[in-house]
Each structure stands twice: as structure tokens, then as C-alpha cells.
């Protein structure tokens, strides 16, 4: 009996001190009550039986059924646990029903009463789901209870996102701690695509549609965390602006646009209706999907920009961030190149195209996003008139040079005049690429365009201008990712010495010494096309690209991959041919027979 008493009392201490601590407040006996009963009683077995009777399921019909379960060796604990689980599920269903029935005041009043009665059991694992369910359905949980949840890590982790939103909206630092890992993950995912080992024109950084991108884990999690809470949405936007200013990383601008459109997809009008960029972003998203800004959408976008009223100029900061999204820049730049090609067919000048001028205006606004947000001077940057009157006509002249050379090559031999492709660039062109960011962006996309067209002559002509560009734009990961992908279309040219010398010696190797990311992109390219490069050139490149002690692990890893590829290409050494055994048989000395004596 003494042993039974100690065991029961000990179990009572454990349960009472821990998860069942809130039961006395509801008038339900717990382990401490059992301990006290066993300590003061003279007949412990009777005391335990009485405790079970008083605290068991009080249904008369069960009294005869329980002994029947005993005969089948079913423990009372298992029976009570089963009943408890069934009751809990019913209670959860009832809480959800209350939350969706009747007037707001009535149902919220019932839920608040239920929370008040049950909250003391919130640390009891079996009851906790019910308490959390009640809190989840309350639009405003009492602040005192929110503080208790926030102070306990386990409770905070267990509560629904609907409850966490109420905690986050008044605790920016805590919300920042939750969001920060997601933002880091987003940037790493973008960089992973840019440095992917798969170089393809069809499957590159810009291949995914906007809607497919919004299904990504980070965007979906952020969308769920924000819900319909405008305050949390504003916090996330502030985080993105701060990080963009700190790092100049345009992926934060992409996330800003994707997040708004993800909320748009869910028809969260509480947020979309108050974000002044919503309709502009929606229209631009359609253009990004088509990778082209058509005339109709161009008019809509212009209407939004022209509609910014005096006193509301601050919205330009958000619009510029939306336009700074690399997917928006890509769409605007591709549309600009297409527009320039159409102008040649129409024999028109750039200054005569209103669509072209709008594209340049939006490119300028997007590329000026960092300066505008940093300076807090919300004014559209003015376009340099010479961009339109000198740079673009010069770019058109390059296109005409290409057309003229192509036509000449197709002429019959007797009519052909020996024409060499121009191999020099006007100094004014390289100056524009160094000093004007819009001209630089358009120029770089023209380089991508001619590379995709497999125009080797035009590429070799323009490559020298890429060594020094505005803010090293030609050395950005996005441009190099696209350039290396497009260069796979010129794979047969990699066997030519002049092509490799211009591409590697005069551009890649020169710039890789300045920025390590160039080193990574060159290695990616060689891993893909090493079999096209001549052995002598490949050996020289292998030596030139060897990592230093200061090189990152990413560069070393890529270099090792290249080495492995080259080792696999080397023919196996031919084993020496074994000497064939001689066919001559040795002649053994035969003794001369003695001459017989007659």
C-alpha cells in the first residue's frame, strides 16, 4: 500500500505542477488533489476508487460498461483518452460553427467567454488546440492574453498565424525576426538561378511567368503572414525599401511587385485598394507576362504616371521601385529594341515615336529608384535629349550596317563588291555606355539581341564597349547570365582563335580581375562549351582562371568542375605493347658420337 501511495503521489506531483496546473480554476481535480487525498487517507485503494468515481465520465450507463471493457483488457486510460479525443473534436467543430454563425457581436462575445474560461489550460497539450482555435477566430484577442502567448516560446510557436498577426502588428522587431529569414531565402533562390549550371536560351532567369513566380515558397509565406493586415503589409514594404537602400539589390524590388500581385490574385481588396501602385503594377504585370508593352497598355501606364497629383509625389518612390524590378526592366528594354527595329522599317526617327519615349521614361524612372528613395526627392528624372537625338540614331546605324552587310553577302558573285564589316566603334557610343544609365541599359540589351541572332560580327564589334559601362552594368549577374546563355547559340565560333581572343582575353579575363562574379560566369560558360574550344586555348584559359587563395568557395567549386570535365575528355594513355615471344626454338648442343674402332 505504501508503494502504491508513493507512486500515485509522485505522479500527481508531476501532473499537477505541469500541464494540468489550470484545472483547479475550473473546479476540476488534478494531481495535487490526488496527492493530498492519498497523503491524508487511511485506505489508499478506497481513496483512489472514490477519486476515479468522482472525476471519471459521469454517465450512469457507463458504470456497467466499464467492467466489460476490463474483461477485454482495455485500460481505463485508453478508454478515457478515446472519449476525450472525440469530445475535443466535437468542441473544435462547435467553436468553428460559433465563429461563422449569427451576428458579429454575438459570436465574438461567446468566443471571448469561452476563451476566458479555457485560457488557464492553454499549456495543457490535450486542451491547447481548443484554446488556440478560439483565439484564431477572434478578430481581437485581449492584449493581456497576447502578451502571455508572446512571452512563452512554445505557446507563440503553437498559435495560429491569425493570432500571430495581432502580436506582430504591435511588435515590429518580432515581425522582422520572422520575415528576415524569408527575405534571405528569396535572394539566395534568385542568385541560385542566375548561377545555375544549365545555360539555355529557352530556360533562363526570365523564363518563368509572373504567376508561376508568385507561387514560390517565400512569396506564399509572406502573403499568408500578412493576410488582410495593412499594417503588416506596410512593415514588409518598409523592410524591402531599407534592404534595397542598404544593398542596391534589385531582387527586393521584384519581391515588392510579386507580393502585391500575390495579394491581388487572392483578391485582398483591403490592401490592394489602399496601395496606390496596385493598378499600375497590375497593368505592368500583364506586359511582363507578354514580354512586350503594346500600344494600349502603354497608354494605360502613361495615364498612371501622368495622374500623379501634386502633393502625392511620394508615390513615385514606390512606382520607381516597381519599375526597378529586373523583370520590368527586361520587358521595357526588349520592347525598346523591338520598337527601334520597327522605326527602321517605317523610316522614322526615335524622337517621333511616343511609345519609345514612354518606354525610355519608365526605364529612367526604374533605374533612378535607388537615388529617389535615398534622397527622398520624389521627382521623375529628366531624360537627356542627346539620348534620343544622338545615341538611339547611332544604334539604328549599327542595325543598318548589319542589314547592308547581310544583303551584300547574299548578292551573286559577279555583282558583289568587297565589303568588310565595320570593326570600330564611335567614341560617342562608348561614352554614352559609360555615362548614361538608360543608354547603357538599351545598349546592353542590343548586345544580347545580336548575340541571340548569332551575329558574331556585331558582337565582336561591340564587345570592347562593355569593359567600361555605367556602374559596371555589363558585369551584373543578370546581364552576364543572359549573355552566357545566348553565347551557347554561337558555340561553333568557340573553335576560332579570333573569336575566343576577343571574348575571353579582351572582355571576360580583363573584367574578372575586377569582379569575382565575372569569374564565376566565365567558368559556367566553359563548363558548358569547353569541348568547342581548341586545346591550346583551353589550356591557356585554364591557367588564367585558376582560383587564388582569396577566391570564394563557389569559384573553387566551379573550377574543380571544369577540371573534372577536362580530365574526362583526355584520352586514356595507350598501354605499351608487350613484346611478342620469339618463335625461334633454342638449339641444344648435341655431343658428337665417338668414332667406332674397326
Image: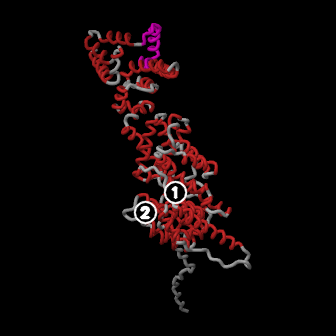
The one of 542 and 592 positioned closer to us in this rendering: 542
Q: Which numbered tag is attached to residue 515?
A: 2
Q: Say what secondary structure mark 1 lies in.
A: loop
What residue would you read off at disc 1?
A: 197
- Magenta stretch: dominant SS? helix
Question: Does any portion of residue 116 appear in the rendered image?
Answer: yes
> Of the residues under marks 2 and 1, which one precedes in the sequence?
1
Select label 2 or label 1 by which is in front. 2
- Does 243 appear above or below 461? above
Q: Say what secondary structure mark 2 lies in.
A: loop
Q: What range of the chain is rendered magenta?
A: 57-81
Can you name the residue that lies furthest to the front here?
Answer: 310
Question: Does any portion of residue 572 appear in the rendered image?
Answer: no
- Name the residue located 53 percent from the left edge and 66 percent from the top edge: 530
User: Image quadrant of residue 447?
Assistant: bottom right
- Name the residue located 40 percent from the left edge and 39 percent from the top edge: 178
Amino acid at each position: 500500500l505504501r508503494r502504491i501511495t508513493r507512486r500515485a503521489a509522485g505522479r500527481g506531483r508531476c501532473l499537477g505542477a505541469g500541464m494540468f496546473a489550470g484545472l483547479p480554476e475550473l473546479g476540476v481535480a488534478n494531481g495535487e488533489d490526488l496527492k493530498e487525498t492519498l497523503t491524508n487517507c487511511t485506505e489508499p485503494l478506497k481513496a483512489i476508487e472514490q477519486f476515479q468515481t468522482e472525476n471519471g465520465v459521469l454517465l450512469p450507463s457507463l458504470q456497467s460498461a466499464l467492467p466489460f471493457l476490463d474483461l477485454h483488457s482495455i485500460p481505463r486510460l485508453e478508454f478515457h483518452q478515446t472519449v476525450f479525443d472525440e469530445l475535443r473534436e466535437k468542441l473544435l467543430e462547435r467553436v468553428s460553427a460559433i465563429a461563422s454563425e449569427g451576428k458579429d457581436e454575438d459570436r465574438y462575445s461567446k468566443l471571448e467567454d469561452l476563451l476566458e474560461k479555457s485560457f488557464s489550460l492553454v499549456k495543457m497539450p490535450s486542451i491547447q488546440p481548443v484554446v488556440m482555435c478560439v483565439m484564431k477566430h477572434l478578430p481581437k484577442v485581449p492584449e493581456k492574453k497576447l502578451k502571455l502567448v508572446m512571452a512563452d516560446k512554445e505557446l507563440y510557436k503553437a498559435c495560429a498565424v491569425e493570432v500571430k498577426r495581432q502580436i506582430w502588428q504591435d511588435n515590429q522587431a518580432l515581425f522582422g525576426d520572422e520575415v528576415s529569414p524569408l527575405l534571405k531565402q528569396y535572394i539566395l533562390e534568385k542568385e541560385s538561378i542566375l548561377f545555375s549550371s544549365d545555360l539555355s536560351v529557352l530556360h533562363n532567369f526570365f523564363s518563368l511567368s509572373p504567376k508561376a513566380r508568385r507561387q514560390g515558397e517565400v512569396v506564399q509565406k509572406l502573403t499568408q503572414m500578412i493576410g488582410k493586415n495593412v499594417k503588416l503589409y506596410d512593415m514588409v514594404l518598409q523592410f524591402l525599401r531599407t534592404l534595397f537602400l542598404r544593398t542596391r539589390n534589385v531582387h527586393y524590388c521584384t519581391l515588392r511587385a510579386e507580393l502585391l500581385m500575390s495579394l491581388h490574385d487572392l483578391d485582398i481588396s483591403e490592401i490592394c485598394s489602399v496601395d496606390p501602385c496596385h493598378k499600375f503594377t497590375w497593368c505592368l504585370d500583364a506586359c511582363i507576362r507578354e514580354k512586350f508593352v503594346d500600344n494600349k497598355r502603354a497608354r494605360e501606364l502613361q495615364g498612371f504616371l501622368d495622374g500623379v497629383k501634386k502633393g502625392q509625389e511620394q508615390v513615385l518612390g514606390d512606382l520607381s521601385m516597381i519599375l526597378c524590378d529586373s523583370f520590368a526592366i527586361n520587358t521595357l528594354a526588349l520592347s525598346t529594341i523591338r520598337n527601334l527595329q520597327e522605326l527602321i522599317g517605317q523610316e522614322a526617327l526615335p524622337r517621333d515615336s511616343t511609345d519609345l519615349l514612354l518606354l525610355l521614361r519608365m526605364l529612367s524612372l526604374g533605374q533612378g529608384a535607388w537615388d529617389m528613395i535615398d534622397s527622398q526627392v520624389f521627382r521623375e528624372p529628366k531624360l537627356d535629349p542627346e539620348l534620343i537625338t544622338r545615341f538611339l540614331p547611332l544604334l539604328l546605324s549599327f542595325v543598318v550596317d548589319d542589314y547592308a552587310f547581310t544583303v551584300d553577302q547574299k548578292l551573286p558573285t559577279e555583282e558583289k563588291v568587297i565589303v568588310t564589316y565595320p570593326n570600330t566603334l564611335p567614341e560617342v557610343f562608348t561614352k554614352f555606355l559609360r555615362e548614361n544609365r538608360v543608354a547603357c541599359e538599351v545598349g546592353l540589351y542590343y548586345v544580347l539581341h545580336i548575340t541571340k541572332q548569332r551575329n558574331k560580327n556585331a558582337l565582336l564589334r561591340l564587345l570592347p564597349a562593355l569593359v567600361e559601362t555605367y556602374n559596371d552594368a555589363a558585369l551584373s549577374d543578370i546581364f552576364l547570365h543572359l549573355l552566357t546563355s545566348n553565347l551557347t547559340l554561337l558555340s561553333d565560333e568557340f573553335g576560332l582563335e579570333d573569336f575566343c581572343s576577343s571574348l575571353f582575353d579582351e572582355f571576360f579575363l580583363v573584367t574578372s580581375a575586377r569582379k569575382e562574379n565575372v569569374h564565376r560566369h566565365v567558368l559556367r560558360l566553359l563548363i558548358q562549351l569547353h569541348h568547342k574550344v581548341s586545346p591550346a586555348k583551353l589550356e591557356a584559359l585554364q591557367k588564367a582562371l585558376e582560383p587564388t587563395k582569396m577566391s570564394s568557395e563557389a569559384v573553387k567549386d566551379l573550377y574543380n568542375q571544369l577540371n573534372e570535365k577536362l580530365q574526362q575528355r583526355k584520352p586514356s594513355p595507350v598501354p605499351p605493347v608487350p613484346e611478342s615471344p620469339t618463335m625461334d626454338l633454342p638449339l641444344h648442343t648435341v655431343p658428337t658420337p665417338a668414332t667406332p674402332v674397326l
